[in-house]
Amino acid sequence: EKKKEKEKKVKFIGPSAHAIQSLGDKIQSKLIAEAAGVSTIPGFNGVVTSPDHAVEIAQEIGYPVMIKASSGGGGKGMRICYDDAQVKEGYRLGSAEAKSFFGDDCLLVEKYVEDPHHIEIQVLSGRNPATGELDILCFAERECSIQRRNQKVIEESPSPHLLPSTRREMIRQVKSLVRNVDYESAGTVEFLVDKHQNFYFLEMNTRLQVEHPVTELISGDGYDSGNYVDLVHGMLEVAAGRGIPQKYLDLVDRSNAEGEAEDGGEGANVRYTGHAIEARIYAEDPFRGFLPSTGPLVKYVEPPPVVGEGEDSCHIRID
């Protein structure tokens, strides 16, 4: 990988091929997460070989369970099952759908977390050119629980559900995972969090997600102040071998003395200011159950960059 980059005089902006491949498969990434001490959903850490095998696993775990594709995402190949018959049907439909979308019909079975909050932690990691050690920045979480057909509709940060103590422990585990795979660049670690603040690893996206502006807008002193983290700039600096800019590292919140003493700063996040919400624009037909709608765009009007005045104003960023 590095030899080819050197020969072609190019540099890939992103994590290593090893990190992408090892975290791209849900079964493999779950094993890696467990090895790093990350909380995972109870389930079978292997390939499900048949409908009867899926039923056997489901009975051991206890219903309800979720069947989902080992590769890919976006809810494809995903089925929630409450009994043996649903597991057999879910295996048949899920494997066919996974094969169609991802070219891989491998499925996994795990405990279904009811009424969960979908929480993700943004990461920016890079090797410090002076020390050779990984600098890891973790940001206040994004909540993306409002979804339609397993596609995110609303993103907000920080989450109204998460307690500061839960955030701190999640970040500590995220940093352990990042070190375990020697991850460099931006990425997102996704979790499910239940009503009791128990959290479980879902997957790590080894790229910069489209919802990253939600994190940028409230990082540091906020987007409008100019003293915030530009994640794309951070990725470019890391790829160039210069590491994470010091001005970004200086934004880590060290104000929790008790937390710092307990975990040595491993649970600290980049400080944040305010609250940000992202609403994705979908072309849907409300008279047909909000199914995707196609056709020409006949009118498009952007909202103004600032709404309201004074302390009641808010900035609108359009991407």
Image: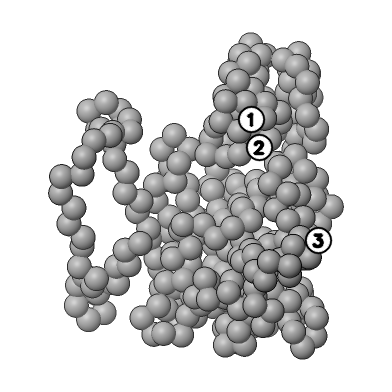
Q: Nearer the viewer, residue 79 or 7?
A: 7
Label 2 or label 3, whichever lies nearer to me, is 2
The structure residue drawn at horizontal position 29% and vertical position 40%, both measured from the top left corner, is 283
Evaluate if marks 3 and 1 touch, with contact meaning CB atoms under 8 Å apart: no
Q: Nearer the viewer, residue 146 or 104?
A: 104
The amino acid at mark 1 is Gly
Q: Which element type, helix, strand or loop, lies under badge 1?
A: loop
Q: Is residue 201 above or below residue 230?
A: above
Q: Which element type, helix, strand or loop, lies under badge 3?
A: helix
Q: CA distance from mark 1 to mark 2?
A: 9 Å
Q: Position of residue 113 (x, y in %)?
A: 61, 37
Which residue position is annotated with label 3? 180
Q: Position of residue 69 (x, y in %)?
A: 64, 32
Q: CA distance from mark 3 to mark 1?
A: 28 Å
Q: Is residue 175 above or below residue 40?
A: below
Evaluate if marks 1 and 2 touch, with contact meaning CB atoms under 8 Å apart: yes
Which residue position is annotated with label 2? 71
The amino acid at mark 3 is Asn
Report how many numbered discs are placed on residues in the image. Answer: 3
The structure residue drawn at horizontal position 55% and vertical position 43%, both measured from the top left corner, is 116
Q: Is residue 245 above or below residue 10?
A: below
The structure residue drawn at horizontal position 36% and vertical position 81%, both measured from the top left corner, is 224
Label 1 or label 2, whichever lies nearer to me, is 1
Which numbered disc flags the more N-terminal residue, 1 or 2? Answer: 2
Q: Position of residue 299 (x, y in %)?
A: 15, 49
Residue 131, picture quadrant: bottom right
Which residue position is annotated with label 1? 103
